[in-house]
Image (tube, coloured by chain):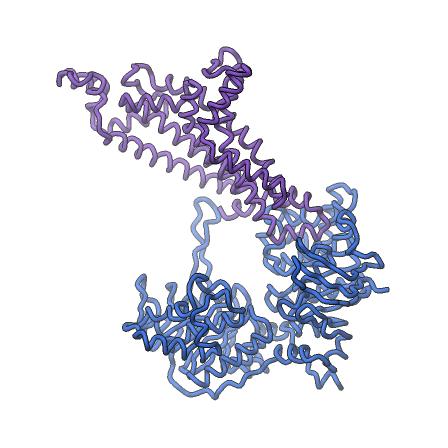
Chain colours: A blue, B purple
Amino acid sequence: MSLLDITNLSLSINGMPILRNVSLSVNTGEIVAVTGESGSGKSLTALASMGLLPKGSQTTGTITLEGQDLLTTSEADLCNIRGNDIGMVFQEPMTALNPVQTIGAQVAETILIHGSMRKSDAMARAADVLTRVGLHQEQFPLSRYPHELSGGQRQRVVIAMAIALRPKLLIADEPTTALDVTTQAQILDLLKDLARDYDMGLLMITHDLAVVSDMADKIVVMHLGEVVEQGETRSLLTNMKHDYTKMLFAASGHQVNLPDLPAYDVLLSVKNVVRDYTTPRKTVFGSKGVFRALNKVSFDIKSGERLGLVGESGCGKSTLTRAILGLEDVQGGEITLDGAPVFTGRKPNFAVRRKMQVVFQDPFGSFNPRHKVARLITEPFHLLQTPPSHDERQRLINQTLTAVGLDPSDANKYIHQFSGGQRQRIAIARALIIQPDLIVFDEAVSALDVSVRAQILDLLANLSAKYNLTYLFISHDLSVVRTITDRVLVMQRGEIVEQGETEQVFTAPNHPYTQELIAAAPILPDLQHLKE
Amino acid sequence: MIRYTLKRFLSLCISLAVASLLIFFVIEIAPGDPASFMLGINAQPDTVAALRAELGLDVPKFERYLAWTQGMLTGDFGMSYTYRTPVSQMVADRLWVSLPLALFALALSTIIALPAGIYAAARRGKTGDVAVMSATQLGVAIPNFWFAMMLVLIFAIKLRWFAGGGFAGWDKGLGAVLWSLTLPAISLALPQAAILARVMRSALLDVMNEDFMRTARAKGLTTTQTLWKHGLRNALIPVLTIIGLQFSFLLAGGIIIEQVFYLPGLGRLVFQAISARDLIVVESVVMLLVFAVIVVNFAVDLAYAAVDPRLRART
C-alpha cells in the first residue's frame, strides 16, 4: 500500500468533466512530479487530494491516504488531516500569507489547531520550524510581517506552515513558478531535503520539465484531465511513449533558427544611464533616501540585432524598459534612438515613439476587452503623422494578422474569444503594424505554456527573417533568451555585469553572477546521456 | 507607527485650517446682510449701520476671520445675531442631543450590520444570504422619515412604549435620555445598517477569494475558523471607512428625524440659523461639524494602521 493512492479519479465541476480516470500513487519518501500544461487538471488533482475542491465538484474513484479514502471522509475529519497528515505549499508566495498576521502567529497556528499546547510552546516550535526552513531567528524573528519578506522568504514561511507538524505527505503546487532562478534552486533543494529528512512523500505539481527531471523519482504527465504517461523518471524520459510527452519535452527545449545577424549601424544607444528613485524619509525630519535602480548602464543595439536582457526581479530590468521607451526621465546619461533622445519631457516625441513598440508579459491584461481586434492592433497609428487611409488600414490589418499566424477575419472579434497564445500574437501584431525599428519584448513569453511558447518563438524567428526585426528581449528565462537572441546583457542590482554574444556568455560566463544564474537554472537532461 | 500618527495629525491640522478659511469666506460672500435682515425691510440706513457696528460686521473681513478662529480656539464662538446669546452655549446644548443620538445610532447600526454582513457572506447564495440582502435592499430604499413615522405610530401611539417625540433632558438621567432617543436612533440607524451590512458582506467575500484563505484551509482550519481568524480583520478596512463616513453623516444629517421627533438637535439649529441669516451660528456649527468629520477621519486612519501592519510601515 502506498502512502497516497489515487485510483480512477474522475471529477466534474458543475457538470463539466475536468478529470478522467486519474490514477497515481506516492510512496513514503518518494518525490512524484505531476506535469502538464494549463488545463491539464494537475492542480485540481492536488486540491482533490487535500479535499479542497471548489463548490459543485462531483467525484468518482478513490483517493486514499494510508488506506483511508479521503473522498468519503467527513469535513471535520478532513480538517484534522489537513496540516497534520498532509501539508500543502502554493504557487503564489506573495499572496499565500495573511498580510495582517505575523509569520510566527501563522506558523504557530498550524501547531495550535492540531494539538492542545500553550501558545508560548507553539511559538517556540514555530521558531524551530522557521529555522529549519532557513529563516533564522536573529534575522527573521517571529514578529515579522509577510510584507517585510521577499518572495523566496515568504515561500519558506509557507513551507514552514505546511511541514510544522511533519506531515506524511507534502503537496507542492508550482512552488517555484513565481520565484527567481537562484531562489527557485534554493527552494527546490529545501523541498528535497525536507522530503528526505522527514521521510515525507512529496507530490509536486509543476509545468517545468527541467525542474521535474532534476528532482522527481517518478513523473506523471497529464493532458486535458487524463494521465497520458507515468513512470520512473529516468525510464520515462529515455523511453517516452506518448506523443504528448514527446511534444512537451521537445517544446520545453525548443530551439529556433534565427537568421544571420546583419551588420548595420547602431540603432539604440544607451550611455551611462542612471535612474534614481527617492525613498521615503526614515525619520520625521530626516532627508529622503535615494535608491539607484540603474547605475551607469551602457549598451548599444544595432539595427537588425536581437538583444537579450536577463536578470532577477528587482535588478532594474523594468526600470530600464521604461527608460528606453521614454516613459520616464533618467538622472544621468542619455538614451538615443537613431540619434534622437527618447525622453523629451512631458510632451512625447512622436518621431521617436513611432519607431518603438513594446509587447508585455500578460496576454490577458494588456488589451481593452471592449474593443475589437482591428481597433486594438491599429492603436499605434495615432503615432503616425498621416494615418493610413481606410483601404490601406484594412490592408495592413489583414497583412499583419496573417503575418502573426492569425486569420484576417479575426479582426472583428473581441479579445476574450482568443487563447493566451493567440492574444500574444495579437500583441505582436499591434507592435508590428507600424513597422517599428525596435520592439521591446518584456517577458513576452513568460506566461505561456511551453508548446505555445515554442510557437511564439518560432513566429519571432520567422518575423525576424521576414521583416528584419530589431528587438530587445527581456526575460528571466535563460533557456529562451539563449535561443532567441544574438547577444545578451546580464543585469544585477542596476548594473550590467556582463555582456557578449549569447552562446559565448552561456558556455563560458565570466562574471560570478552570470555563473551563478546559469548554474541555478534547471536544465533539461540530455536524453542521449541518460540512455547510456 | 509614531511617524504615521504624526503625519496623520499634521494632515488633520492642515485640513482644519483650510476648512475654516473656506467656511468663513464662502458664508461671507453669500448674499443677505444680517443687520438689515434683523431690522426688517423698513429699517433706516443709519440704524442698520449702527447694528452692523454693534455686531462687529464693519471691521475688515480678514480681521474678523482671525478673531473668529482665535475665539473658537478658546471656546468663545461669539454672540448669535438673532438670539443675542453666546453661540457656544447654544451649540453645546444642541450637541448634547445630537452627539448621543449619533453615537446611539452608530452603535445600533454597527451592532446590526456587522453580524448580518458576516452571516450573509458565510452563507453566500443560500437562503440566509438572500434574506439578509433583500432586507438591506429594503433598508436602503425606505425613506427614514417615513420609517420614523411608522415607528411613532406603532410604538408611541398604539403601544405607548415610548414618547412620540421630544427630548427628556439630561437632568432626568441617562436612562430617560436613552429612552427618548431610542426611536430616533433606530430610524437613523436602519438605513445606515443596511449599507454597512452590504459593505461588510462584499468586503468579506472579496477576502474569501484571497489565496491566504485557501492556505488557512490547507492548514486544517474549518471554513468558519478561516472566516473569523483570517477573513474578518482583512475585511475591516472598507468597513471602517464607511463607519467613519456614517458618523459624520449622523451628527448633522439627522435634521429630518429631529423634526419628526421634535428633538432640539444641531440640524434644527443650523436650519433655523440659516433662515435667520444668523451667520455666526451657521459658521460655528458648520465648523464644528467639519471638526468632527476631520477628527473622526483621523481616528479611522489610526484604526486602519491598527488593523493593517503594512500601513504602519508605509506611513
Give percent across and percent down for residue B308.
Answer: 56, 44
Give percent across and percent down for residue B159.
Answer: 55, 16
Image height of B36 relative to A61, above or below: above
Q: How many marks?
A: 0
Residue at point 44%, 33% (across, down): B295
Q: Is residue A414 left or right of residue A63?
A: left
As drawn, the residue found furthest toward the top would be B171
Q: Is residue A74 left or right of residue B303?
A: right
Image height of A487 relative to B285, above or below: below
Q: Is residue A44 left or right of residue A465?
A: right
Q: Quadrant of residue A296?
A: bottom left
Residue at point 22%, 29% (across, down): B31
- Front residue of B158/A253: it is B158
- Front residue of A213/B273: it is B273
As drawn, the residue found furthest toward the right would be A1
| Residue B175 shows in the view | no
Image height of A96 relative to A332, above or below: above
As drawn, the residue found furthest toward the left would be B45
| Residue A94 shows in the view | yes
Give percent across and percent down for residue A27.
Answer: 81, 65
Residue at point 74%, 45% (across, down): A112
Give percent across and percent down for residue B50.
Answer: 17, 16
- Front residue of B173/A229: it is A229
Image height of A179 relative to B277, above or below: below
- Front residue of A397/B288: it is A397
